[in-house]
Amino acid sequence: MSPKPDGWDGKSRGGYAGYAIFIFLIRHVGLRAAYILLGFVAVYFVPCAPKATAAIWDYYRRTLHRGRWVSAFCLIRHYYRFGQTLIDRVAVENGLGKRFRYAFESYDEALRLFEEKRGLVMIGAHFGVPSIGAEFFGEHAERINMVMYDAEHRRVKEALNRFGQRTELRIIPVGDDPLASILDIKAALDRNECVSFMGDRFLNAHRTFEADFLGRRARFPQGPFLIAERMQVPVVFYFATRERHRTYRFRFFIAGVETGRRRDGSRCFEAFLPLLEEEVRRRNEQWFNFYKFWN
């Protein structure tokens, strides 16, 4: 099995119990009640999730250079923002999508690439809940395949399915057999479908890019960028962030098709990294990586 990054085992925060509580509250009490309870949950996680808390503390203190008191506030806010995205996802999947507002940047350009009905790679990061925006691609949403680490996929699927949640998105799980995942990804692109990756986490420590990120050295997955260049398909970078008044903003950046001789993923990665850094600086409390990220 491939080496894993220190502190992350392929699973995201949150699980069956957390989803269960929020699904119950949203269905029987309301969205506002779920947000109120979340305030207590956020405080609870500070001492009860020590590894994640240490990683967030390091993020604010050593990377963003916040003071102690500011970092303490940001720590609780970080957990709260993450919980909000989980609640919002459950709410939308329970038919409450109209309770939210949506804003888009370069949406028409991204939609035109879908309408060309050719293979397409989308690369995002762990901001907000990108899947909330899938419905705005209409019939094209059925052509979106999300690449997700198997442990993460099984945990979310179990929690949602046991409460009757359904998602139209297709999932390509990445597990102990990476070749099978690569074949599934290639097959989807050959069918002129879209494959969506997260470009800020990795499991295979031998296939990474290392770069300066927010002033410190960090590693990023090579796979999404390598596949995009090798398959010579259009690439769209995207980010989804939550703003005031229950507004989700979706930003799309068209990267085009890599046609150069060097197809190791580096050019695509170099185009992605400054956009990610800009997004993190803009909405630092919504970048949800709860493990030791920097070298």
Image (spheres, rainbow, N blue to C red):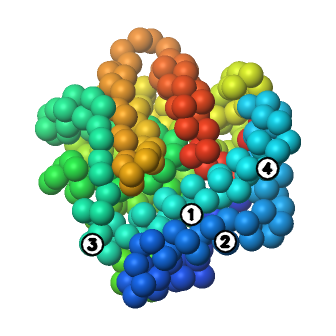
Answer with left or right where residue 114 lies relative to residue 237.
left
Residue drawn at 83 percent across, 52 percent down: 54
Work out whether mark 2 precedes mark 3 in sequence or the reverse, and give the earlier one. Answer: 2
Residue type (three-letter) at the residue carrying disc 2 = Val
* Residue 252 x, y percent position in the rendering: 35, 32
Q: Residues within 10 Å of mark 2 (few under 14, many from 20)?
A: some
In this rendering, which labeled residue sits more in front, label 2 or label 3?
A: 2
Q: Residues within 10 Å of mark 4 (few under 14, many from 20)?
A: some
Tally the marks.
Answer: 4
- In the rendered image, which quarter is residue 167 located in? bottom left
Q: Is residue 154 above or below residue 205?
A: below
Name the quadrant containing residue 62: top right
Cα gap from disc 3 to disc 1, whole angstroms:
19 Å
- Report the disc number at residue 41: 2
Q: CA distance from mark 4 to mark 1?
A: 17 Å
Asked if the residue at tag 3 contacts the one at tag 4, i.e. Cβ–Cβ closer than 8 Å, the answer is no
Give above or below for 243 relative to 27: above
Between marks 4 and 3 in the image, the one whose residue lies nearer the viewer: 4
Mark-to-mark CA distance, 4 and 3 = 35 Å
Q: Describe residue 38's horizontal placement relative to residue 64 as left or right.
A: left
The type of residue carrying mark 3 is Gly
**158 relative position to 219: left or right:** left
Judging by the rendered image, the residue that carries numbered circle 1 is: 83
Query: Do the CB atoms of the residues marked 1 and 2 lie less than 8 Å apart?
Result: yes
Asked if 203 appears above or below 271 in the picture, the reply is below
- The amino acid type found where label 4 is placed reads Ala
Name the residue beneath numbered marker 3: 95
Residue 65, x across and y down, in percent: 79, 30
- Between 241 and 160, the residue placed more toward the observer is 241
